[in-house]
Structure formats: C-alpha cells, structure tokens
Amino acid sequence: MSIAKILQERSSTRAFLDKPVAEETLNTIFGHAQLAASNCNVQPWQTCVVSGSTKDKLKAKFMETLMSGAAPNPDFNWTPKYQGVHRERQFGSANALYTSLGIPREDKKARQMAMIRNWQFFDAPHAVFFTMDKYLDIMGAVDLGIYAQSLGLLLNEHGISNCMQGALGQFPDPVREILQLPEERGILFGMSFGYADDSADANNTRTDRADIDTAVAFYD
C-alpha cells in the first residue's frame, strides 16, 4: 500500500481487539523505524514498548495516580494553550469523538471517563512511550515526531492500527518507576497500538483536514 493511501485511510484508533501482534512482526516494524531521519543523525529516541503484565502494571498505576487527584507533571513543556483556528480544530476533534460515542456536550462525567481511556491504552495489547534525554529539548522533540510518524505508517502498512497520545506524557512518574528509567530521560508522548475493533463506535470517528491552500505556500 502506498504512503498516500495509508494517510487517506488511517485514523486514530481508540478500541482494540484482544489480539497481540506477533513478536517477529514487532521486530520487523521497529527495525525499519530505525531508518527514520533525525537532525545530524543523532537518533535521540529511546523507545519503550510495553505489553502483557508490564502494560497492565502501568495501567493500574495510571489509574491509581488519576484517582488520587494528582495534577499532570510532564517532563516537557505542555503549557501552551491553543488559540484561534487551532483551538477551533481542537474542539472539532473532541466533538467528532464524543459524537461517535453518543456523549452529549453537557455530560461532563461521561466525557471525563472517555478521557481516562487514554491511560488504559484503550485496551490495546501494546503501547509505546517515546522518550529521550531531557536536555535535547525541542530539537529532540522534532526528531521524535519524525520517528513516531514513521513508526505509525509502518504499523498501518502491516494492518496494525494506532493512536498517538499526548496524554501518555502527562504523568511520567509511573512510567519512570515501572520501567526503571533514569531521571535524565524524559517521556514526551506515547502511542497505543494493535488490531482495531471495527465494531466499536469510537473507531467511527473521523476528522477533516485544512485545504492545501490554507496550509501550504509555494514560492517560485
């Protein structure tokens, strides 16, 4: 399948089958992802793939953290608030999801429960945490974005669905504790992946894209 076709057909998946991806397939996909571009070829990504009991421990720890009322304490700067058209698109994305789930705007509790599903990995059999040395800051974040997009496309090429999740970077302490990561390593964001449950309402969510005329300028 061409990259253009994958981009046309992919969407964020928020419900998965209880069907792990074969280890050989994972090794192939993550091996190919190592070919992703990076500034000066520094390859800053330290990719943590969790499955099985480790994933379940993280899920339980996330739930414990959330239920305690702890505030997010991300390793990197998540403070900017969307403005203007970016905020409109953010609201549009949320509205598309909650409409698919049949959750009305006024049902704040149901929306909160839908949000919590992020830290349950949407019941995916696998999740990835994209980590890097904290000192790398924005340059490392650019490289991790390139790597994550390459990985996502490779997964889709193999029929494996995924959902990129900024939420998985909001509470880094449980990840650092369970995966025994050094303090100098920061968790930027994560991704849940596996085989999509096509019968789930959440997976009917679709968002639009800006026209090329508003996003791209060509200069001769």
Image (cartoon, rainbow, N blue to C red):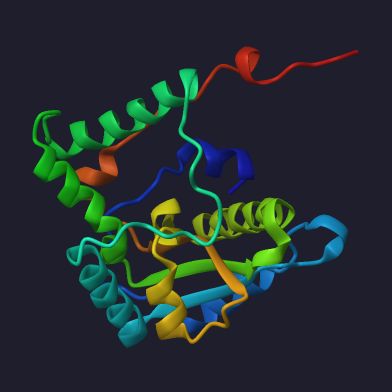
Q: Judge by depth and name the residue closer to the eye, 155 or 50.
A: 50
Judge left or right: residue 85 versus residue 171.
right
| Image position of 153 with respect to 20: above or below | above
Picture residue at 40% right of the left edge, 84% below the top: 178
Asked if residue 29 is positioned above or below residue 207 in the image, the reply reads: below
- 182 vs 123, nearest the viewer: 182
In the drawing, does residue 71 fall left or right of residue 131?
left
Q: Quadrant of the C terminus?
A: top right
> Total marks drawn?
0
Q: Position of residue 191 (x, y in %)?
A: 45, 60
Residue 81 coordinates in the image, percent (x, y): 46, 34
Please identify the quarter of the rendering in which residue 196 is found: bottom left
Q: 68 or 16: which is nearer to us?
A: 68
Specify the quadrant of the image occupied by residue 177: bottom left
Residue 53, compared with residue 1, is above or below; it is: below
Q: Answer yes or no: is residue 115 visible.
A: yes
Determine the residue located farthest toward the right in the rendered image.
Answer: 220
Q: Is 206 placed above or below 157 here?
A: above
Q: Decide which of 193, 139 is in the foreground and name it.
A: 139
The residue depicted at 17 percent of the width and 42 percent of the height is 111
Q: Position of residue 70 (x, y in %)?
A: 28, 62
Across and down, in percent, residue 60 comes to 23, 76
Q: Is residue 21 visible?
A: no
- Is residue 120 shown left or right of residue 219? left
Tell me which residue sits at (21%, 72%) in the image: 64
Residue drawn at (62%, 45%) of the image: 2
